[in-house]
Image: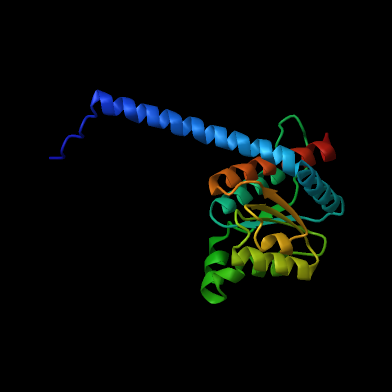
């Protein structure tokens, strides 16, 4: 028989509730403060990224995205917003965007055969064309596969946008345009990245099709 779970004492339960409420409050406040810093420090950079993407799309180019872990999920999310739509009030054609993070056969074969540090660069070599846009998402800017992807993008004539955090890392020097979330906390940076992604997608959609 399974032992019955122990019941918390009323005092312990009260402490747990108080701890959780504080954690929730602190987390939301930290996230809000990060967003305020993004507004103060990154608004112009976000607007420049919108200009870069609109210019590329007007020239019939496409958007490629790469990132690791939670940033990989952000790449899929942002690519989907471009391809499908952000606003249900705007009827528009699909915007060509590809997350290089979704093909497990490609990623595992590349990791096995040419090294994980090369998987995104290899896909850019295969799919990227001059004038396309690469959005590279990295909280630290230090991931080798992201930095090699940015190098390959430069070699092939893509315009690169870095969604970065902390001090931008080496990626800051390798991308054409950096948006650096002003935080050292990975969670807060990731929250900032998806918010910035939504803003960029929304502005591109509205300015091109509304």
Q: Which quadrant of the figure contains the N terminus? A: top left
On screen, residue 203 versus residue 138, left or right, reads right
Q: Name the residue located 77 percent from the left edge and 67 percent from the top edge.
A: 154
Task: Kindly indicate the quadrant of the structure image that contains residue 8.
Answer: top left
- Give the camera-side residue of 12 and 80: 12
On screen, residue 144 versus residue 20, left or right, reads right
From this view, report whether residue 96 is shown above or below residue 9: below
Tell me the colour scheme of the image: rainbow
Tell me where residue 204 appears, x and y as whole percent.
79, 42
On screen, residue 142 versus residue 174, left or right, reads left
From this view, report whether residue 144 is shown above or below residue 17: below
Tell me where residue 20 appears, x and y as whole percent.
40, 31
Tell me where residue 149 appears, x and y as whole percent.
67, 66
Tell me where residue 110 appears, x and y as whole percent.
56, 70
Q: Name the residue located 76 percent from the left edge and 45 percent from the top edge.
A: 46
- Give the camera-side residue of 15 and 88: 15
Q: Name the residue located 68 percent from the left edge and 61 percent from the top edge.
A: 171
On screen, residue 28 versus residue 12, left or right, reads right
Count of numbered labels shown in the rendering: 0
Q: Which quadrant of the figure contains the C terminus? A: top right
| Residue found at the far left of this picture | 1
Residue 130 visible to an observer of this rendering: yes
From this view, report whether residue 73 is shown above or below residue 198: below
| Residue found at the far bottom of this picture | 113
Residue 85 visible to an observer of this rendering: no
From this view, report whether residue 121 is shown above or below residue 25: below
- Give the camera-side residue of 6 and 116: 6
């Amino acid at each position: 028989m399974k032992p019955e779970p122990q019941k918390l004492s009323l005092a312990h339960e009260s402490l747990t509730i108080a701890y959780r409420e504080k954690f929730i409050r602190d987390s939301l406040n930290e996230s809000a403060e990060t967003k305020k810093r993004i507004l103060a420090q990154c608004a112009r950079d976000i607007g420049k990224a919108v200009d870069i993407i609109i210019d590329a799309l007007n020239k019939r180019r496409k958007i490629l995205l790469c990132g690791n872990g939670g940033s990989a999920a952000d790449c899929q999310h942002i690519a989907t917003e471009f391809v499908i739509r952000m606003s249900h009030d705007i009827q528009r054609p699909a915007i060509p965007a590809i997350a290089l993070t979704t093909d497990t056969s490609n990623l595992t074969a590349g990791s096995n055969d040419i090294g994980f540090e090369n998987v995104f660069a290899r896909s850019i070599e295969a799919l990227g064309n001059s004038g396309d846009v690469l959005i590279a998402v990295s909280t630290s800017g230090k991931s080798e596969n992201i930095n090699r992807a940015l190098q390959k993008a430069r070699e092939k004539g893509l315009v690169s946008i870095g969604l970065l955090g902390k001090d931008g890392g080496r990626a800051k020097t390798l991308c054409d345009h950096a948006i650096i979330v002003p935080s050292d906390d990975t969670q807060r940076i990731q929250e900032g990245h998806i918010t910035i992604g939504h803003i960029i997608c929304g502005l591109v959609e509205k300015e091109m099709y509304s």
